[in-house]
Each structure stands twice: as structure tokens, then as C-alpha cells.
Image (tube, rainbow, N blue to C red):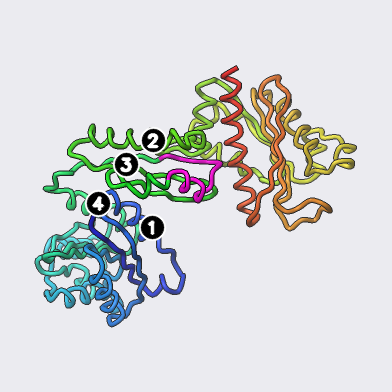
Amino acid sequence: MKRAEIIAVGTELLLGQIANTNAQFLAKHLSTLGYHHHFQTVVGDNSDRLKHALEVASSRSDLIILTGGLGPTKDDLTKEVVSEFVDETLVYHQPSLQFIEQYFIKVNRPMTENNKKQALVIDHSHVLVNKNGMAPGMVYESENKQFVLLPGPPKEMIPMVENELIPYFLIGKEMNTIVSKELKFFGIGESILETKILDILETQSNPTIAPLASEGEVMLRITASASNELEANRLIEKAEHEIRERVGQYIYGTTGDNLFIVLSKKLKELNLTISAAESLTGGLFSKRMTDIPGNSSIFTGSIVCYSNEMKQNLLNVPSELLANYGAVSEECAKSLVENMQGLAKSNISISFTGEAGPSTLENVPVGKVYIGIKIGDSEPVIKEYQFSGTREQIRLSSVKNGASLLIKLINESQDL
């Protein structure tokens, strides 16, 4: 498998003024194109430093992808430096130049001379049309190196990669069909997951398996190359079967899923409704559920009862209970979930109470959370957790663990 690396050009990236989301997007696609990806570089708007970055990248990689620096200003110098590096001249791409000229006519503004610069491309390169901006991208190929130049704005770069670059790379290749499938994991850390499937990861070739951790979850992307989609899917199924045999109990979904989508689908399939009583989570569970179109049929409503007064006044949590056990307690979570279900008349209810910090309560550590779930007429299930991280991370961990626990309990109730 050939080697690729990414060079992101822009002083604003070095200064942390914007996030390097382009590199993140490109990294996800490199394995699907048949490349190993070992290096990323960020370099400012400086021709000498960019030239040095190209020298280093060319010494170790077959494909060098550059993003940014294709605009009209003096500090947009990517194609000038690359053209000099590959010993080619810059020429005008007439369709792009005509598009730029027509744009300024359309908006009734004079076109300054430097805007023409955006239509320059490296001679003998393959031009990637920019349908969402002015500066085209390009692919320059020498005997054993490929240089790809892409615009910096994600709204231009992403569709150019998807609609222009990937099809270009696939033209004429025997393995011209690439299929990917994502396996979504919850309840297992990235390091433990990797340990359990390490031999699979170490011997992968086709399909490739790429792990990615994010927001308390882990994803494995399985990507297969084949002459047709049927064969690519067969390769994926074989790898997926081996992974599921080892860690299948932690897989909650596949491509396009998240915990709340899976939970919502399950509730709709079973014609069940749900409500929520949220203290420390401040409505985050409700937001995640109502972010999904069509969930008005299953989500009856929620109450954010952040203060003890609201717990008492809206959800009838006894003042004696709060005085004896406190708001961060199993007893409070139980009272909240029972009363919320009765108020909303929902099939299922869930409650969240805890301390996201900094703690103002004695003997209550930051990150201590109780989640209550009541399904039908059954006795409420109350789970205690100890999370770590920032306030936002504790809240997110709470709602994700709540969704995961709901899925598990609903599955178990269907098996009875």
C-alpha cells in the first residue's frame, strides 16, 4: 500500500485561530483510496518553510495532499511553491477564469487583477473543478509522486474531494469499487478494544480496519476494495463476523447510527413512548432525542428540575427525601423517574441526577451520577456512575450511558 501525507497551509492554523478539520476529513478517506497515512504537517504562509515541508514529505510519501493557499492574496502561495518544486510553470485554466469573470459581472463588482490568480494551475496537471468557489484544485503526477492541491475552505474542499478527487483516483483501477462500513461501540475503551482485536489489526490488508475514539465511544471503520460492490461487501462481512465474535456485545450500531438514533428506532418499532426528568443534564438528553426528526411520536416531554424546589414543586419529590438523602442519591433518582412517568403517562421514563462540579455538596464527589429508568409497571432500575472530565463531558457521559442502558433494558424486557 502506498504512503500519503497531508500538508495544511495557513498561518491561522498555526495560531489556533481555526481548527484543522480538513486534515481530519482527508485522513478518513485516505485508507479507502488505498494509502497508508503516517504524517500530517501544518505550515504557515511562508514559501521557504513550505518548500522544506515538501522536501520532507516527498522523501517519505508517494502522495502529498496540500490544502489551503490557493486564494487571490499575496500570502496564498501554495501553487507557486509547488510549481517551482516540480519544475513546472503556472498557466491559466480558462474555464475557471471565465467563471471568475462572470461572477464579478453578475454581482456588479469590479474584478481586481489579483482575482485572476485563482485561475492559475500547474501546467500538465489534472484540474479539479471548484463548483463551490473560485480556485480550482489540481493533481500533478510525476513518475512516482502525486501532488494534490485543494482549496482551504471546507465548503469547497469537501465536495471537491468527494466529487472530483476520489473519482479521479478510481479511474482505470482494477479495484475500482471501495465500500466502507462503520461499527459503533459503547462501554469499551479504545485501548481495551484494540487489545482484543490486535492480531486482526496487525494483519489487515484488504479490508483495512481503522479505529477512531470520540466522545466516550469507539468506532471501527472497515474498508474493502474490490472489482465490484458484492465482493467488497463479502470482504467486509468476513472481517465484521470475526470482530463481532470477540467484542460483539459492545456493538450498538453501524454506519449512520448513534445511541439516540438506535434508541429511537427501537422505541418506534415497539410503539413505546418515553419521557425524561433531568437535573444535572439540564435538558441534554431531551435535546439529543428531539434532534432526531419524527421523534414527536415517541418523546412525550421532559422536565428540567435543576433546583430542589423544582424537584419538589414539579415532580413531587418529598422534601423529607431530599433532606435525608440529598438530590444526588438513588432515592431521588427513583422518585424522579416514577413521578415523571406518571405525569407524562409514558411507557418509559428516565431520570438524571448528580454532581457535574464544582461540588457544593458535602460527601458528593464531582462526577457522581444516578440514572433511573422505569419501564411500564416494573420496578425502577437505578444505576450509580462515577464519571470524570469537564462539566460538559460528565453531562455527555450521563446521557450516553442513559441511552445505552435504556437500549439494554428494553432488549432484555423483550427477551422475557
| Distance in Å between CA atoms under marks 3 and 2 | 16 Å
Say which element carries label 4. loop
- Which mark identifies residue 180? 3
User: What's under tag 3, amino acid-wise?
Assistant: Ser
What is the spatial separation of the Cα atoms under label 1 and label 2, in whole angstroms?
A: 28 Å
Counting from the top left corner in percent of width and height, residue 177 is at 21, 41
The magenta region covers 183-197
Q: Mark 1 — residue?
A: 24
Up/down of 76 relative to 22, above or below: below
Residue identified by numbered label 2: 242
Please tell me whether residue 192 belongs to the stretch shown in magenta: yes
Mark pair 3, 1: CA separation: 17 Å
- Viewed as shown, does residue 282 lie left or right of 175? right
User: Residue 202 in the image: x percent, y percent?
Assistant: 36, 50
> Between tags 4 and 1, which lies in front?
4
Q: Amino acid at mark 1?
A: Gln
Q: CA distance from mark 2 to mark 4?
A: 22 Å
Q: Residue placed at 12% from the left, 66% from the top?
A: 142
Expressed as whole percent of the image width and height from the top left, the position of residue 207 reads 29, 43
